[in-house]
Amino acid sequence: MSHHCHAVVVCCIDFRFQKYIRKWTDENLKDQTFDLVGYAGSAKDLDTILSQIDISVRLHQISQVVLIHHEECGAYGAESSLEKHTADLLKAKSAILSRYPHLDISLYYLKLSGEFTPVQ
Ligand SMILES: [Zn+2]
């Protein structure tokens, strides 16, 4: 039995942001299926997140990865700055691409206001 899905979305557990993430996936992954990974700090613990992406690739043949970090992240504490999140998101992107060059990877920094800022 195989069941494919389009994407995996990785985000922090922080409850304050879930409504914004739901709204974003409703709008941006409309009519598409996706796996959802919630982990404190999102891709901060890169090995853990890579193990989850491995499973999405292997079981569901995903083609897209969406990594969402957010403002004022408790898992980062005083280190939670846009610069630090940007650096970690870019590091995660290159680690994922080195394993799975075919994947399309989107990075976002989500503000307390609900605004999604693309990270490049
Ligand atoms: Zn967080």
Image (cartoon, rainbow, N blue to C red):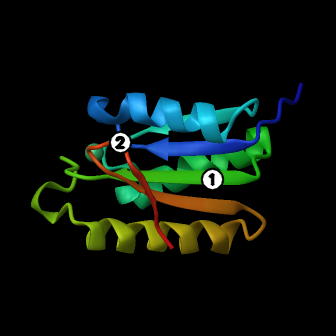
Residue 35 in view, yes or no: no
Disc 1 + disc 2, Cβ < 8 Å:
no
- Within 10 Å of disc 2 (Cα), the crowding (few <14, some 14-19, many 20+) is some
Q: Is residue 72 left or right of residue 31?
A: left
Quadrant position of ligand 1: top left
- For residue 83, the mark is none
Q: Secondary structure at mark 2?
A: loop
Asked if the residue at label 2 sits under 8 Å from ligand 1, the reply is no
* Residue lying at 40% horizontally and 28% vertically, measured from the top left: 19
> Where residue 70 sits: x, y (%)?
32, 51
Q: Quadrant of residue 117?
A: bottom left
> Where residue 25 sits: x, y (%)?
58, 36
Furthest residue in direction right, as rendered: 1
Q: Is residue 73 left or right of residue 18?
A: left
Residue 34 or residue 17, whichever sits in front = 17
Q: Earlier in the sequence, mark 1 or mark 2?
A: 1
- The three-letter amino acid code for the residue at tag 2 is Gly
List the residue tagged with mark 1. 65
- The three-letter amino acid code for the residue at tag 1 is Val
On screen, 97 above or below 8? below
* Residue lying at 45% horizontally and 51% vertically, measured from the top left: 68
Instruction: Tell which tag, 1 or 2, sits nearer the viewer.
Output: 2
> Where residue 30 sits: x, y (%)?
70, 33
Residue 66 or residue 96, whichever sits in front = 66
On screen, 44 above or below 27? below
Residue 90 in view, yes or no: yes
Q: Secondary structure at mark 1?
A: strand
List the residue tagged with mark 2. 114
> Quick one: quadrant of the N terminus?
top right
* Residue lying at 29% horizontally and 43% vertically, measured from the top left: 113
Q: Is residue 118 left or right of residue 99?
A: left
- Number of numbered discs on residues: 2
